[in-house]
Amino acid sequence: MNRFTLYMLSLLLLFSACRKDEPVFDQSPDARINATLSEYQAALLNSATGWKATIMPGAGGLYHFYFRFNNENRVFMYSDFDTATAKYQKESSYRLKALQQPTLIFDTYSYLHLLSDPDAAVNGGNYGSGLSADFEFSMDTLYADSIILRGKMNNTRLKLEKASQQELDEWQNGQWAEALSFVNVTNIQNYFKRLNLGGVEYEIFIEPTSRTIVFQWISAGVTKSFVTTYIYKPGGIIFESPLINGSQTIAGFSAITWNDATQKLTVKSGNQTGSIGGAIQPLKIDLNAPKRWWQTAVNNETYWESFAGFHVNGVDDAFKINTLGRFYSLIYWPEYESGVDLYAPVFINNAGTGLELQYGAAINTPQFTPDGRAVFTILGAYGDYPNSGPAFQSLIQLLIPQGYYFIQTSASSYDMVSALDAKTWITWNF
């Protein structure tokens, strides 16, 4: 090392030694954190007409919110979660906290918590995680007219944008609540839901959690299908992609009204007025579906299984099969013995180490009718089958003389729908 290098190194060390006790920042860490929190607090308050917000949970779907924050850690909100949250403003609390970065925490149960509620009955999501949404958010990016936040647990993106007076009025005047009337489609008790619009009939299937809609219709004897997601807007819904059927284009619905007496929705699409109501059979019956369902289990040497039991007249597990002690699932086992099927509840054994059959119904091979139904009749019983209670009621339901249509929903799942009125069904999986 030459003399010049040594000289420069000595100067550098001397300079560093002289400055080692001088603070790098003008303020202490606590002061800087408090200043940052104050900046974000001021930003939240800096919209007299509040904030419009969007969030996309991990389970899918796009949800809209309205927030107005005050300086007393109170937040006032609307949401397009359901008709009540769109109609009635809710007051809750919030706080800003310095974690690894400034964090906005909605710290009492609010409309936002509905998305993350671990009870799937609340939001239609998964037990334990709901829709995989958040209620604690890192303050990611602050702009003049918007704030981007990131969920602490599920990384869901929450975007706040300053709301105009008109956008606030749309919540307060009920235009969002009018749009949310569309959720009443799930109150139609029939499995099959039929849209009549401009002289065309469509079978529609709604998945309200992911906000997905499936259309099926018949064109020149061929079944056509179309799938799109939808989002709510003031006064109606819009589709991510429009349905185009010849000269008819459906980009969404407006002027949505629900008639509880007739169990029908009235909607508009462009200049056309239509209605959505229940139907007692598919638009086009899959004549081979019942036999295909039965034969699939035989070919795979397995059985069909349902964890939810029968849905009847809008009620899940209407016969309360899940209330049986140590109940695990309901099964249908084609060819349990030669020429005999088994229908039975399956239970967890006393040790909790496996499954067991305690009793079952011996069922004839179903009658597969030419019009696409399966009709079940009983031969006898395995063991002491109850003559009352959930298992008995489920068996009586299976044996209705009208039988069932089968709707294949995947390679390993079918919905079995009552041919009596399509208000009773059960989902089978293997």
Image (cartoon, helix red, strand yellow):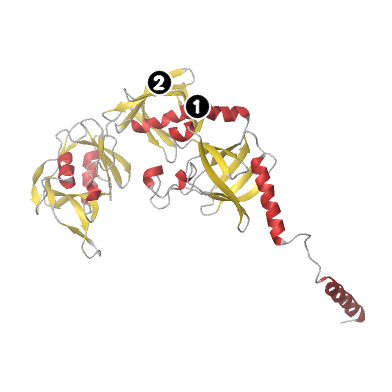
Which numbered marker is on residue 317? none
The crowd level at tag 2 (other Cα within 10 Å; few <14, some 14-19, many 20+) is some
Q: Which one is in front in this view, the residue at disc 1 or the one at disc 2?
A: 1
Q: Secondary structure at mark 2?
A: strand
Residue carrying label 2: 274
**In this picture, is 318 found above or below 265?**
below
Can the viewer see residue 219 in this picture?
A: no
Residue at horizontal 68 percent and vertical 49 percent from the top: 38
Kind of residue indicated by mark 2: Gly
The crowd level at tag 1 (other Cα within 10 Å; few <14, some 14-19, many 20+) is some
Q: Are marks 1 and 2 in contact (CB under 8 Å)?
A: no
Q: Residue 292 in the image: x percent, y percent?
A: 24, 42
Q: Residue 429 in the image: x percent, y percent?
A: 28, 48
| Quadrant into which the N terminus falls | bottom right
Q: Residue 166 in the image: x percent, y percent?
A: 60, 27
Can the viewer see residue 173 in this picture?
A: yes
Which numbered marker is on residue 174? 1
**In this picture, is 43 found above or below 216?**
below
Kind of residue indicated by mark 1: Gly
Judge from the rendering whether residue 413 lies leftward or rightward of residue 93; answer left or right.
left
Q: Secondary structure at mark 1?
A: loop
